[in-house]
Amino acid sequence: MSKAVLILVLLSSFAVASLPESGYYDVQEVLVRNALSAKQNGSAWDPFGGAPDLVLQFLIEDNGNEWVIITTGTKENSGTSASWSSEWEIAFEDPLQESSSAYLIIKVWDSDSHQSDFMDSGRIALSDLVVGENVIECNYGTRVSFEIDGPHNQGRIHP
């Protein structure tokens, strides 16, 4: 397993009803399916017709503010699907409070050396996240699934 990134996210105003305890959670087994095979204008994502190089960003949004918490590695020439077996660790710390405006957003990008092109995005209320499998249906049909495991008592970096 590749080295995980320890990311502490202070969620003092977010509700995580389905993740009832504060602590450290692992985000793992990320899978993308049905990503767009071409840009909306019909052109290829990469020069000479190359397949997109998928990369994901996981963000927290609350009251219009966004914080990036995870950026996956790039999957070169992945096409319309990709998977990551890495684990990323997120800390939900006390006090956890209800917030109807807090979301986990996933943005799907085609990563290129000169610029990255936005492909799709979707979101789920933090209160709807569960320990186990979570699925986000994005705006243009991309489907992103991932597992959440935890809570763990203390932070750690996975080898």
Image: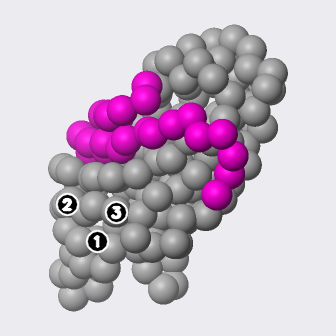
* Quadrant of the image containing the N terminus: bottom left
* Mark found first going from the N terminus, 3 or 1: 1
Residue under the image location 26 percent in, 42 percent down: 143
Residue 139 is at least partly visible in this image: no
Near-viewer residue (155 or 80): 155
91 relative position to 150: left or right: right
Residue under the image location 54 percent in, 23 percent down: 19
Image height check: is 119 above or below 74? Answer: above
Q: Which residue is mark 3?
A: 84
Q: Amino acid at mark 1?
A: Pro
Q: Quadrant of residue 93?
A: top right
Q: Which residue is mark 2?
A: 80
Tell me the element at label 2. loop
Q: Amino acid at mark 3?
A: Trp
Q: Which residues are magenta?
A: 130-156
Cα separation between marks 3 and 1: 16 Å
Tell me the element at label 3. strand
Image height check: is 133 above or below 51? Answer: above
Labels 3, 1: front one: 3
77 relative position to 15: left or right: left
Image height check: is 154 above or below 7? Answer: above
Q: Which residue is mark 1?
A: 52
Cα separation between marks 2 and 1: 8 Å
* Mark found first going from the N terminus, 2 or 1: 1
The percent coordinates of residue 40 (x first, y second) are: 28, 54
The percent coordinates of residue 105 (x first, y second) are: 52, 39
